[in-house]
Image (cartoon, rainbow, N blue to C red):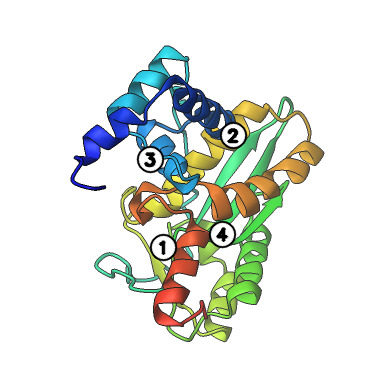
Amino acid sequence: MMGIARSTYYDRRDGQADDTAVVEAMFAICDEFEFYGYRRVGAALRQKGLVVNHKKIRRLMREHGLQPKVRRRFVATTDSDHNGPIFPNLAREFAPTGPDQLWQADITYVALPDRFVYVAVILDAWSRMVVGYAIGRSIDARLTLAALKTAIECRRPPAGCIHHSDRGSQYAAETYRQHLGHHGLAGSMGRRGNPYDNAKAESFMKTLKVEAVYPMAFQTYDDVIEHLPDFIETIYNKRRLHSALGYLSPQQFEDQHIRQTGKTAA
Protein backbone atom coordinates (compact mmCIF):
# COMPACT_ATOMS: atom_id res chain seq x y z
CA MET A 1 0.00 0.00 0.00
CA MET A 2 2.98 2.33 -0.65
CA GLY A 3 3.80 2.89 3.02
CA ILE A 4 0.25 3.86 4.04
CA ALA A 5 -1.04 2.17 7.17
CA ARG A 6 -3.76 -0.42 6.58
CA SER A 7 -6.20 1.43 8.85
CA THR A 8 -5.53 4.69 7.03
CA TYR A 9 -6.16 3.02 3.70
CA TYR A 10 -9.55 1.76 4.76
CA ASP A 11 -10.42 5.07 6.39
CA ARG A 12 -9.57 6.97 3.23
CA ARG A 13 -11.58 4.74 0.93
CA ASP A 14 -14.50 4.50 3.35
CA GLY A 15 -16.91 6.99 1.80
CA GLN A 16 -20.71 7.11 1.75
CA ALA A 17 -20.92 5.14 -1.48
CA ASP A 18 -18.93 2.30 0.10
CA ASP A 19 -21.15 2.44 3.20
CA THR A 20 -24.20 2.07 1.00
CA ALA A 21 -22.76 -0.99 -0.71
CA VAL A 22 -21.80 -2.52 2.63
CA VAL A 23 -25.23 -1.89 4.16
CA GLU A 24 -26.98 -3.33 1.11
CA ALA A 25 -24.83 -6.44 1.37
CA MET A 26 -25.52 -6.67 5.11
CA PHE A 27 -29.28 -6.45 4.52
CA ALA A 28 -29.05 -9.30 2.00
CA ILE A 29 -27.01 -11.43 4.42
CA CYS A 30 -29.25 -10.74 7.43
CA ASP A 31 -32.39 -11.25 5.39
CA GLU A 32 -31.28 -14.80 4.60
CA PHE A 33 -29.64 -15.54 7.95
CA GLU A 34 -31.61 -13.66 10.60
CA PHE A 35 -29.61 -15.14 13.48
CA TYR A 36 -26.17 -14.03 12.25
CA GLY A 37 -24.22 -11.88 14.72
CA TYR A 38 -21.60 -9.36 13.66
CA ARG A 39 -18.82 -11.97 13.38
CA ARG A 40 -20.70 -14.12 10.85
CA VAL A 41 -21.88 -11.02 9.00
CA GLY A 42 -18.25 -9.91 8.76
CA ALA A 43 -17.19 -13.29 7.44
CA ALA A 44 -20.01 -13.26 4.88
CA LEU A 45 -19.00 -9.77 3.77
CA ARG A 46 -15.40 -10.93 3.28
CA GLN A 47 -16.65 -13.76 1.07
CA LYS A 48 -18.33 -11.06 -1.02
CA GLY A 49 -15.03 -9.14 -1.26
CA LEU A 50 -15.97 -6.47 1.30
CA VAL A 51 -13.47 -6.12 4.16
CA VAL A 52 -15.01 -4.09 6.98
CA ASN A 53 -13.81 -3.48 10.54
CA HIS A 54 -15.83 -5.44 13.11
CA LYS A 55 -16.60 -2.27 15.11
CA LYS A 56 -18.11 -0.70 12.02
CA ILE A 57 -20.17 -3.82 11.31
CA ARG A 58 -21.59 -3.72 14.85
CA ARG A 59 -22.41 -0.02 14.49
CA LEU A 60 -24.09 -0.43 11.11
CA MET A 61 -26.09 -3.42 12.30
CA ARG A 62 -27.28 -1.44 15.31
CA GLU A 63 -28.12 1.67 13.28
CA HIS A 64 -30.07 -0.28 10.66
CA GLY A 65 -31.89 -2.66 12.99
CA LEU A 66 -30.01 -5.73 11.85
CA GLN A 67 -29.47 -7.23 15.29
CA PRO A 68 -29.76 -11.05 15.34
CA LYS A 69 -33.05 -12.49 16.54
CA VAL A 70 -33.24 -13.83 20.08
CA ARG A 71 -33.09 -17.62 20.14
CA ARG A 72 -36.00 -19.47 21.65
CA ARG A 73 -35.55 -22.05 24.36
CA PHE A 74 -34.92 -25.53 22.96
CA VAL A 75 -36.61 -28.55 24.52
CA ALA A 76 -35.38 -32.05 23.66
CA THR A 77 -36.67 -35.46 24.67
CA THR A 78 -34.95 -38.85 24.51
CA ASP A 79 -36.55 -42.23 25.08
CA SER A 80 -33.76 -44.03 26.95
CA ASP A 81 -36.03 -46.08 29.20
CA HIS A 82 -35.65 -49.40 27.42
CA ASN A 83 -34.00 -52.79 27.86
CA GLY A 84 -31.98 -52.70 24.67
CA PRO A 85 -28.20 -53.00 24.66
CA ILE A 86 -26.05 -49.90 25.12
CA PHE A 87 -22.95 -49.29 23.02
CA PRO A 88 -19.78 -48.14 24.81
CA ASN A 89 -18.90 -44.47 24.48
CA LEU A 90 -16.23 -44.41 21.76
CA ALA A 91 -16.59 -40.71 20.98
CA ARG A 92 -15.86 -39.22 24.38
CA GLU A 93 -12.15 -38.64 23.77
CA PHE A 94 -12.03 -39.08 19.99
CA ALA A 95 -11.13 -36.02 17.90
CA PRO A 96 -11.72 -36.59 14.17
CA THR A 97 -9.10 -35.25 11.76
CA GLY A 98 -11.01 -35.83 8.55
CA PRO A 99 -14.39 -36.80 7.09
CA ASP A 100 -16.32 -39.94 7.99
CA GLN A 101 -14.35 -40.80 11.10
CA LEU A 102 -17.09 -39.83 13.57
CA TRP A 103 -20.78 -39.40 12.89
CA GLN A 104 -23.25 -38.02 15.41
CA ALA A 105 -26.96 -38.85 15.25
CA ASP A 106 -29.94 -37.17 16.87
CA ILE A 107 -33.72 -36.72 16.60
CA THR A 108 -35.88 -33.65 17.03
CA TYR A 109 -39.49 -32.70 16.43
CA VAL A 110 -41.42 -30.06 14.49
CA ALA A 111 -44.58 -28.93 16.24
CA LEU A 112 -47.59 -28.55 13.95
CA PRO A 113 -50.97 -27.18 15.14
CA ASP A 114 -52.40 -30.68 15.61
CA ARG A 115 -49.45 -33.07 15.73
CA PHE A 116 -45.67 -33.50 15.63
CA VAL A 117 -43.36 -34.31 12.75
CA TYR A 118 -40.00 -35.89 13.54
CA VAL A 119 -36.58 -35.34 12.00
CA ALA A 120 -33.62 -37.73 12.35
CA VAL A 121 -30.21 -36.41 11.35
CA ILE A 122 -26.69 -37.80 11.02
CA LEU A 123 -23.88 -35.23 11.16
CA ASP A 124 -20.22 -35.61 10.30
CA ALA A 125 -18.59 -34.38 13.52
CA TRP A 126 -15.47 -33.16 11.71
CA SER A 127 -17.09 -30.90 9.10
CA ARG A 128 -20.58 -30.49 10.65
CA MET A 129 -21.98 -31.65 7.32
CA VAL A 130 -25.42 -33.26 7.47
CA VAL A 131 -24.69 -36.55 5.70
CA GLY A 132 -28.10 -38.12 6.16
CA TYR A 133 -31.56 -37.21 7.39
CA ALA A 134 -35.14 -38.43 7.36
CA ILE A 135 -38.51 -36.81 8.08
CA GLY A 136 -41.50 -38.81 9.27
CA ARG A 137 -44.74 -38.87 11.21
CA SER A 138 -43.55 -41.43 13.75
CA ILE A 139 -40.57 -41.39 16.11
CA ASP A 140 -39.32 -44.96 15.85
CA ALA A 141 -36.44 -46.99 14.45
CA ARG A 142 -37.81 -46.71 10.91
CA LEU A 143 -37.09 -42.99 11.02
CA THR A 144 -33.52 -43.29 12.29
CA LEU A 145 -32.82 -46.21 9.96
CA ALA A 146 -33.94 -44.16 6.96
CA ALA A 147 -31.48 -41.40 7.93
CA LEU A 148 -28.70 -43.97 8.40
CA LYS A 149 -29.33 -45.59 5.02
CA THR A 150 -29.21 -42.19 3.34
CA ALA A 151 -25.92 -41.32 5.05
CA ILE A 152 -24.30 -44.63 4.08
CA GLU A 153 -25.43 -44.32 0.47
CA CYS A 154 -24.21 -40.73 0.29
CA ARG A 155 -20.82 -41.14 1.96
CA ARG A 156 -19.82 -44.82 1.75
CA PRO A 157 -17.99 -44.57 5.10
CA PRO A 158 -14.93 -46.73 5.75
CA ALA A 159 -15.07 -49.60 8.22
CA GLY A 160 -14.53 -48.32 11.74
CA CYS A 161 -16.35 -45.03 11.31
CA ILE A 162 -17.87 -44.29 14.72
CA HIS A 163 -21.61 -43.75 14.84
CA HIS A 164 -22.45 -41.91 18.06
CA SER A 165 -25.91 -41.22 19.46
CA ASP A 166 -27.78 -40.89 22.70
CA ARG A 167 -29.29 -43.96 24.36
CA GLY A 168 -32.64 -43.64 22.64
CA SER A 169 -34.55 -46.81 21.83
CA GLN A 170 -34.48 -45.89 18.13
CA TYR A 171 -30.68 -46.36 18.13
CA ALA A 172 -30.71 -49.44 20.35
CA ALA A 173 -33.21 -51.27 18.11
CA GLU A 174 -31.98 -54.57 16.70
CA THR A 175 -32.58 -53.56 13.08
CA TYR A 176 -30.53 -50.40 13.58
CA ARG A 177 -27.65 -52.19 15.27
CA GLN A 178 -27.62 -54.84 12.56
CA HIS A 179 -27.38 -52.19 9.85
CA LEU A 180 -24.46 -50.54 11.62
CA GLY A 181 -22.64 -53.84 11.88
CA HIS A 182 -23.36 -54.87 8.28
CA HIS A 183 -21.67 -51.70 7.03
CA GLY A 184 -18.74 -51.79 9.44
CA LEU A 185 -19.76 -48.81 11.56
CA ALA A 186 -18.78 -48.84 15.24
CA GLY A 187 -21.76 -48.08 17.46
CA SER A 188 -21.25 -45.60 20.29
CA MET A 189 -23.64 -44.08 22.85
CA GLY A 190 -23.32 -41.22 25.29
CA ARG A 191 -23.72 -41.18 29.03
CA ARG A 192 -27.23 -40.97 30.37
CA GLY A 193 -28.44 -37.39 30.66
CA ASN A 194 -25.15 -35.91 29.42
CA PRO A 195 -25.72 -33.37 26.60
CA TYR A 196 -22.02 -32.85 25.84
CA ASP A 197 -21.35 -36.29 24.36
CA ASN A 198 -23.49 -35.48 21.32
CA ALA A 199 -23.05 -31.72 21.37
CA LYS A 200 -22.45 -31.10 17.67
CA ALA A 201 -25.59 -32.93 16.57
CA GLU A 202 -27.63 -31.21 19.27
CA SER A 203 -26.18 -27.86 18.20
CA PHE A 204 -27.34 -28.50 14.65
CA MET A 205 -30.83 -29.34 15.91
CA LYS A 206 -30.97 -26.01 17.73
CA THR A 207 -29.94 -24.24 14.52
CA LEU A 208 -32.60 -26.15 12.60
CA LYS A 209 -35.27 -25.12 15.10
CA VAL A 210 -34.45 -21.42 15.41
CA GLU A 211 -33.48 -20.73 11.79
CA ALA A 212 -35.81 -22.99 9.83
CA VAL A 213 -38.67 -24.28 11.98
CA TYR A 214 -39.69 -21.36 14.20
CA PRO A 215 -39.64 -18.66 11.46
CA MET A 216 -41.67 -20.80 9.04
CA ALA A 217 -44.42 -21.76 11.54
CA PHE A 218 -45.25 -24.89 9.55
CA GLN A 219 -48.92 -25.82 9.41
CA THR A 220 -48.88 -29.21 7.69
CA TYR A 221 -46.66 -32.22 7.14
CA ASP A 222 -46.40 -31.29 3.47
CA ASP A 223 -45.07 -27.85 4.46
CA VAL A 224 -42.25 -29.51 6.38
CA ILE A 225 -41.43 -31.89 3.52
CA GLU A 226 -41.39 -28.99 1.04
CA HIS A 227 -39.16 -26.56 2.93
CA LEU A 228 -36.96 -28.36 5.47
CA PRO A 229 -34.81 -30.34 2.99
CA ASP A 230 -33.80 -27.12 1.23
CA PHE A 231 -32.63 -25.61 4.51
CA ILE A 232 -30.58 -28.71 5.36
CA GLU A 233 -29.09 -29.41 1.94
CA THR A 234 -28.64 -25.92 0.50
CA ILE A 235 -28.62 -23.32 3.23
CA TYR A 236 -26.99 -25.20 6.12
CA ASN A 237 -24.63 -27.57 4.30
CA LYS A 238 -23.55 -25.26 1.50
CA ARG A 239 -24.01 -21.66 2.62
CA ARG A 240 -24.37 -21.16 6.38
CA LEU A 241 -21.06 -20.06 7.91
CA HIS A 242 -19.87 -21.94 11.00
CA SER A 243 -17.61 -20.24 13.53
CA ALA A 244 -15.92 -23.52 14.49
CA LEU A 245 -14.96 -24.04 10.82
CA GLY A 246 -13.23 -20.69 10.44
CA TYR A 247 -16.45 -19.11 9.17
CA LEU A 248 -16.85 -21.52 6.29
CA SER A 249 -19.90 -23.60 5.51
CA PRO A 250 -19.58 -27.39 5.93
CA GLN A 251 -19.35 -27.80 2.16
CA GLN A 252 -16.72 -25.07 1.87
CA PHE A 253 -14.77 -26.69 4.70
CA GLU A 254 -14.79 -30.09 3.01
CA ASP A 255 -13.92 -28.55 -0.36
CA GLN A 256 -10.97 -26.77 1.25
CA HIS A 257 -9.81 -30.12 2.67
CA ILE A 258 -9.97 -31.68 -0.78
CA ARG A 259 -7.89 -28.87 -2.28
CA GLN A 260 -5.28 -29.12 0.46
CA THR A 261 -4.99 -32.91 0.65
CA GLY A 262 -6.50 -34.26 -2.53
CA LYS A 263 -8.61 -36.57 -0.38
CA THR A 264 -12.37 -36.64 -0.76
CA ALA A 265 -14.95 -37.82 1.75
CA ALA A 266 -15.06 -41.60 1.79
Q: Are marks 4 and 2 in contact (CB under 8 Å)?
A: no
Q: Nearer the viewer, mark 4 or mark 2?
A: 2
Answer with mark 2 or mark 3, whichever residue precedes in sequence: 2
Residue 152 placement (x, y as % from top left): 60, 75
Q: Which residue is mark 1?
A: 125
Q: Which residue is mark 4?
A: 170
Is residue 27 shown to the viewer in this render?
yes
Q: Which residue is mark 2?
A: 32
Q: Inspect the image, locate mark 1, and give the three-letter code of the amino acid beneath it.
A: Ala
Answer with mark 3 or mark 1, whichever residue precedes in sequence: 3
Q: Are marks 3 and 1 in contact (CB under 8 Å)?
A: no
Image quarter for residue 67? top left
Between the C-alphas of marks 3 and 4, the distance is 47 Å
Apparent side of residue 5 relative to residue 120 in the rendered image (left or right) = left
Q: Is residue 130 above or below residue 45?
A: below
Q: Inspect the image, locate mark 4, and give the three-letter code of the amino acid beneath it.
A: Gln
Between the C-alphas of marks 3 and 1, the distance is 30 Å
- Near mark 2 (Cα within 10 A), the count class, few <14, some 14-19 or many ≥20, is few
